[in-house]
């Protein structure tokens, strides 16, 4: 398993070299969105309206951070459970989104979209939120402020530690890991 | 019978405020102990790294700049009120809600309560969810459980058939937790409620997650079931954060009550690896 340092926006070349199980330290801009923001973005697309950001090459982090203390860019910011974004991720991947960051399984449709459009699902460690919060250097709400923790934020991150979970070749880290460690007690 | 005792709801509000802040930033000691034991036994290098990240997270959070998890949960309160307690200075439910609201504001905790349909965030993390029990005596015991949405979503109530019995219960819990996989932030504490009725089973399951981690049930039959379920879940290979390993659950805790001759209610509630809960007696 390899280890890569990547900076957003991501290209097809960045994605193709990644294999499920690889470790990635991600830097650059990532956008936050979870349930309510995804509902609104996909609604906007249906109406032919513009999205709060162009998804081409971008990575969306499924997170609703806790409030920032004074002098800090953000509070705790660990991943939320990703399956709730199953209906939305393939639509945004088709529009050029290159990565999702979250925790837990996603659907076969998401896996297929990762293969077809060369995208990647990165797993972060759920509940390691204080540690991840420290990787965020800058945060700014860019859309839907009324959604509070669910607003869309533009984050600047430095060396955010991630695992490649679904790669663009159809592999699934959760399935591989589970098989390797089953019935070992 | 104990003497009737006045308890000011202002003291309850203050207690809730302190418990909520403490829960958000400081992991219960028994949970950390169980994780350290799991670390010693773990054979997967990745799992060990995940557990090290979890320990690092606990350390960072204890300095109180960042909560243990960004999902600081809804406030779930188990309120045991002695029947000889007389609450003064206001309404107990208002006081609890005020304590929660103040803690979530002052502690930079996330406000996660919303309208179920419009999903509009209420911005105050209210209302608290309060389970009240009247008990003998003149004391008030408060358990504050900060329950996040990820682990809560991996819950269920199922009305089994009486003939499903012990083995049916075990199979249902194991299948459910394996299906949940990485979603509830393993290593988890699995709470199981057996019997009672539909809603009692659910309350028992959640209450069971708050028992000292790994302390077996007093009932030897249930204690044996807890061990059997735990071994089966940990043989799934899911591991910490779902990245493979021997530690998918830290413990299985079962509570049980009598049920109707026609029913076998079963509830499963999962606590994630930070299992934030604190308690106090007034």
Image (tube, rainbow, N blue to C red):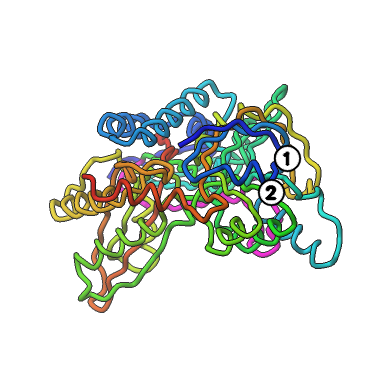
Residue under numbered circle 2: A33
- Label 2, secondary structure: give it: loop
Q: Chain of mark 2?
A: A
Q: In this rendering, would A41 be left or right of B204?
A: right
* A76 falls in the magenta region: no
B179, above or below B112, in the image = below
Residue B43: give x, y in percent of width and height.
28, 35
- Relative to the observer, which residue lies in front, A81 or B274? A81
Magenta residue span:
B111-138
* B118 falls in the magenta region: yes
- Relative to the observer, which residue lies in front, B63 or B205? B63
For label 2, the crowd category at 10 Å Cα-Cα, with few meaning under 14, some 14 to 19 and many 20 or more, is many
- Label 1, secondary structure: give it: loop
Residue A75: give x, y in percent of width and height.
64, 32
Q: In this rendering, would B213 be left or right of B149?
A: left
A140, above or below B61, in the image = below
Q: In this rendering, would B8 be left or right of A39?
A: left
Residue under numbered circle 1: A9
Residue at 26% across / 64% down in the picture?
B171
């Amino acid at each position: 398993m390899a280890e890569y340092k990547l900076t957003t926006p991501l290209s097809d070349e960045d994605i193709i070299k990644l294999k499920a199980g690889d470790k990635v330290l991600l830097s650059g801009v990532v956008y936050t969105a979870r349930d309510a923001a995804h509902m609104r973005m996909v609604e906007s697309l249906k109406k032919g309206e513009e999205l709060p950001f162009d998804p081409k090459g971008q990575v969306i982090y499924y997170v609703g951070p806790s409030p920032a203390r004074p002098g800090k860019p953000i509070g705790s910011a660990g991943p939320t459970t990703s399956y709730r974004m199953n209906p939305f991720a393939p639509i945004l991947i088709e529009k050029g989104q290159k990565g999702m960051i979250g925790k837990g399984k996603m659907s076969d449709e998401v896996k297929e979209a990762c293969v077809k459009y060369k995208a990647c699902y990165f797993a972060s460690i759920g509940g390691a939120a204080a540690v991840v919060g420290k990787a965020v250097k800058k945060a700014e709400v860019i859309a839907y402020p009324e959604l509070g923790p669910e607003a869309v934020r533009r984050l600047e991150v430095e060396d955010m530690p991630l695992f490649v979970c679904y790669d663009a070749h159809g592999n699934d880290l959760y399935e591989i890991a589970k098989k390797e460690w089953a019935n070992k007690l | 019978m104990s003497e009737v005792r006045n308890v000011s709801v202002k003291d309850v509000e203050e207690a809730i405020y302190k418990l909520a802040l403490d829960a958000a930033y400081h992991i219960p000691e028994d949970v950390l102990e169980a994780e350290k034991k799991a670390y010693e036994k773990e054979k997967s290098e990745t799992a060990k790294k995940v557990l090290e990240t979890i320990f690092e997270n606990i350390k960072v959070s204890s300095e109180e700049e960042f909560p243990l998890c960004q999902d600081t949960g809804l406030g779930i309160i188990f309120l045991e009120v002695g029947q000889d307690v007389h609450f003064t200075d206001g309404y107990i439910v208002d006081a609890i809600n005020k304590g929660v609201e103040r803690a979530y504001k002052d502690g930079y905790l996330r406000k996660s309560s919303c309208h179920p349909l419009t999903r509009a965030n209420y911005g105050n993390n209210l209302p608290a969810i309060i389970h009240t029990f009247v008990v003998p005596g003149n004391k008030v015991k408060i358990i504050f459980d900060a329950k996040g949405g990820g682990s809560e979503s991996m819950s269920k109530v199922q009305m089994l058939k009486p003939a499903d019995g012990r083995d049916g219960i075990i199979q249902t819990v194991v299948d459910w937790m394996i299906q949940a996989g990485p979603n509830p932030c393993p290593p988890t504490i699995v709470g199981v409620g057996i019997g009672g009725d539909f809603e009692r089973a659910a309350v028992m399951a959640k209450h069971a997650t708050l028992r000292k981690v790994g302390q077996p049930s007093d009932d030897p039959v249930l204690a044996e079931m807890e061990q059997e379920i735990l071994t089966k879940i940990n043989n799934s290979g899911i591991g910490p954060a779902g990245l493979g390993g021997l530690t998918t659950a830290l413990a299985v805790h079962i509570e049980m009550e009598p049920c109707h001759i026609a029913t076998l209610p079963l509830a499963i509630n999962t606590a994630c690896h930070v299992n934030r809960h604190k308690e106090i007696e007034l």
